[in-house]
Each structure stands twice: as structure tokens, then as C-alpha cells.
Amino acid sequence: MRPGPLKDALLRSASGFDWIAGDGRLADRLASAELVGPDGILQADSLRLGVFLQSPQTHYPSHSHAAEELYLVLAGTPLWRKDAGRFEPVSPGSAVQHLSYQRHSMKTEGDALLALWLWTGDLSFSSYQLHETT
């Protein structure tokens, strides 16, 4: 998939999104906007679909949640880790899937990460758990 046109359309619309910053030390390094879902611009009860931004030189620590998750990388070449595996580069246009409660972590180096994310299954944020702090 060539993410260019979708990336461009999202960037043109980004100022109208309801962005939520990361927590704690990541407050100025991560941001997400839910477009479709219980809290989205378009209401849906069976999924959450949104946009995710991660600044360059940022490590989003290992975390998990009940929802199954799919990311579509639109820009940047982040390093992705699942469970206790190694960080592997992910190219724009690639999809990354996480199963329910599967630990995952992302790092960016020189480029920011722009991605679409999709949650299915248990959409509650109450199951979100951070597994490392650095």
C-alpha cells in the first residue's frame, strides 16, 4: 500500500481532531486522536479507529491492553517490538498487529511516526497497562 494520499489527507485535517497527549514524561512526545468509536468524531460501539503521532527520538514503553490492535504505518520507519522480541524496523505502508494483552513497544529515531490504529474486541481503556517506565 502506498500511504502518501491517506497521510496527506490526515495531515490536512489534523487541526480539527481532538488530540489526546501521552501521560507523564511522554506528554509532549505522543498524541492520539480517535476518529471512529465510542469517543470518536463518528460514533461506533464495536471498534475504535484513530490517528497516532510519536515524536522522533522517542521510546513508547512496553504496554498491553485487552483490545486487539492493528497499526498502519503512514510515515516514519519506527522500530517495533512485540513481547520479549527484538526491535524491528517497520516501513511506511506496513501493518502491525497486536493480539489481546500482547506486550508491544515502539521507538522512533530520526523520523516521527504517523499511523492509523484500530482497536477491536474489548474497547475499554481500563485494561491498559504500562510494563516499563523507560
Image (tube, rainbow, N blue to C red):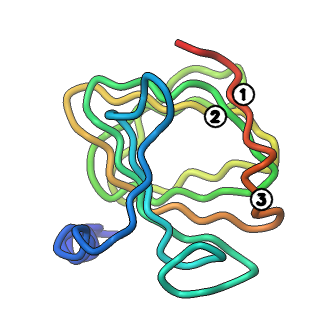
| Earlier residue among tags 2 and 3 | 2
On screen, residue 43 versus residue 73, left or right, reads right
Mark pair 1, 3: CA separation? 21 Å
At a point 73% along the width and 68% down the height, the residue shown is: 120
- Residue 13: x and y in percent read 23, 76
Residues at circles 2 and 1 in contact by the CB criterion of under 8 Å:
yes
Residue indicated by mark 3: 124
Q: Quick check: 92 above or below 101?
A: below
The answer to which image quadrant residue 28 occupies is top left
The answer to which image quadrant residue 128 occupies is top right
At a point 68% along the width and 75% down the height, the residue shown is: 47
Assign a secondary structure to mark 3.
loop
Q: Quick check: 74 above or below 9?
A: above
Specify the amino acid type for callout 3.
Ser
Assign a secondary structure to mark 1.
loop
Quadrant (top left, top right, bottom left, bottom right) of the N terminus: bottom left
Residue indicated by mark 2: 104
| Earlier residue among tags 2 and 1 | 1
Residue indicated by mark 1: 83
